Image (cartoon, rainbow, N blue to C red):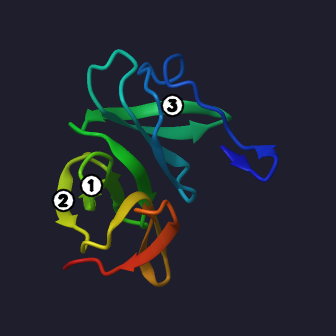
Amino acid sequence: MRKGTQTLETINTDTELGHKIQISAMAVDEATGIVWLHGPAADNSGFPLLRARIEAGAAVLIDAKEIGFALSALAWDGENLWGVARFLRGVVVKIDSETGEFLTTFQVPELGVFFEGIAFGEGGMFLLGKDADQKGVIAEIAIPE
């Protein structure tokens, strides 16, 4: 992970965590030092979600869960993980940060945008994507109850 030009941490999912994945999404809880990494397994056997703790400059695997499909982005809201489904246009999933289980799935209103990023701020959930003309779009999305 980089902040400016400073390397904060590097993680080799194969040698440090025992799961070789092509990382396509990540989320971090800075308060606890927990990082979630997601992507296709290098051997094409699935789409694991790895949960690890950064301790003394090394990543230590807490657990790995198969979630069944690809996410293009992950975000931590302070309580749960949220992901943007890679191949299901406009689908956002809420994921239990401890178990990796899906708590809810919802369809974002059709905006003609392919969303690939997610973040949380004081205003709520924000999605990043591109429209049909490849122009960048940031949308604030109401979180369904």
Give the residue drawn at x 24%, y 39%.
69
**How would you rate the neighbour count of disc 2 (Cα within 10 Å): few for under 14, some for 14-19, many for 20 or more?**
few
Reply above or below: 3 against 55: below
> Real-space Cα distance between discs 3 and 2?
26 Å
What's the CA distance linking mark 2 and mark 1?
Answer: 6 Å
Q: Which residue is mark 1?
A: 96
Whether 18 is drawn above or below 108: the answer is above
Image check: 4 left or right of 19?
A: right
Sequence order check, earlier mark of 1 and 3: 3
Q: Is 40 positioned to the left or the right of 68 in the image? A: right
Mark closer to the chain start, 3 or 2? 3
- Location of residue 26 in the rendering, given as x and y in whole percent from the top left corner: 48, 46
Q: Residue furthest bottom?
A: 123
User: Looking at the picture, how far across and down is residue 65, in whole percent?
Assistant: 27, 35
Residue wearing tag 2: 103
Outermost residue, right direction?
5
Mark 1 and mark 3 residues within 8 Å of each other at the beta carbon: no
Q: Badge 3 is on which residue? A: 60
Residue at disc 2, secondary structure: strand
Q: Who is closer to the viewer here, 130 or 107? A: 130
Cα distance in 3D space between marks 1 and 3: 20 Å
The amino acid sitting under disc 3 is Val
Q: Are marks 2 and 1 in contact (CB under 8 Å)?
A: yes
Residue type, numbered disc 2: Leu
